[in-house]
Image (cartoon, rainbow, N blue to C red):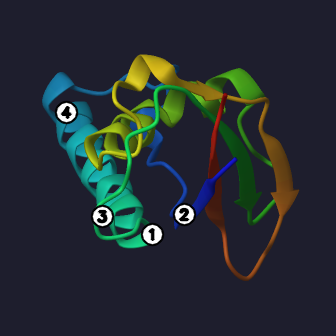
Amino acid sequence: MSSITITIPLPERALSPNTRVHWSRKAKAVKRYRRLAWAASFDATPCTPERWAKASVAIVAYYPTRRHPDPDNLIASLKAALDGIADAGIVSDDRGLWPLRPEIVIDRTRPRIELTITEEP
């Protein structure tokens, strides 16, 4: 099985399913985060990647404090990032990309999200 690891910043607050923001502000945040994940995925893949039919995504979220979203809201906040991964051509369709239960860790110096995409048989 092959795998690819990418690192992206924590999602903006506007991407949380519980945040009430104007639709245009959320749309801009989705576009930025999707593009960011696409760029990170594109940089991490070989020149001509083979598209996987199915893949799992292991999520490790590094937050600066103990205050963080619960796991299901974190996954929902990462939807734009998962779409960006599919846009980069790692999987043939984002329906084949399955997020696993996230691990949440405290890192006061470098908050980030690490996504490890692993091809499934």
Give the image location of residue 96, x and y in percent.
Answer: 49, 21
Above-or-below relation of 78 to 73:
below
Could you classify mark 4 by the number of other residues whose Cα lies within 10 Å: few (under 14), some (14-19), or many (20 or more)?
Answer: few
For image coordinates 79% across by 30% down, the residue present is 101
Circle nearer the N terminus (3, 2): 2
- Which circle, 1 or 2, is nearer the viewer? 1
Q: Mark 3 is on which residue type?
A: Ala
Above-or-below relation of 48 to 78:
below
User: Label 3, on which residue?
Assistant: 39
For image coordinates 29% across by 61% down, the residue present is 48
Alpha carbon of mark 4 to alpha carbon of mark 3: how far?
18 Å
Could you classify mark 2 by the number of other residues whose Cα lies within 10 Å: few (under 14), some (14-19), or many (20 or more)?
Answer: some
Above-or-below relation of 57 to 35:
above
Could you classify mark 3 by the number of other residues whose Cα lies within 10 Å: few (under 14), some (14-19), or many (20 or more)?
Answer: some
Secondary structure, mark 3, is helix
Residue 39 falls in image quadrant: bottom left
Residue 27's tag is 4
Residue 55 falls in image quadrant: top right
Q: Marks 4 and 3: CB-CB under 8 Å?
A: no
User: Label 2, on which residue?
Assistant: 6
User: Label 1, on which residue?
Assistant: 44
Circle nearer the N terminus (1, 3): 3
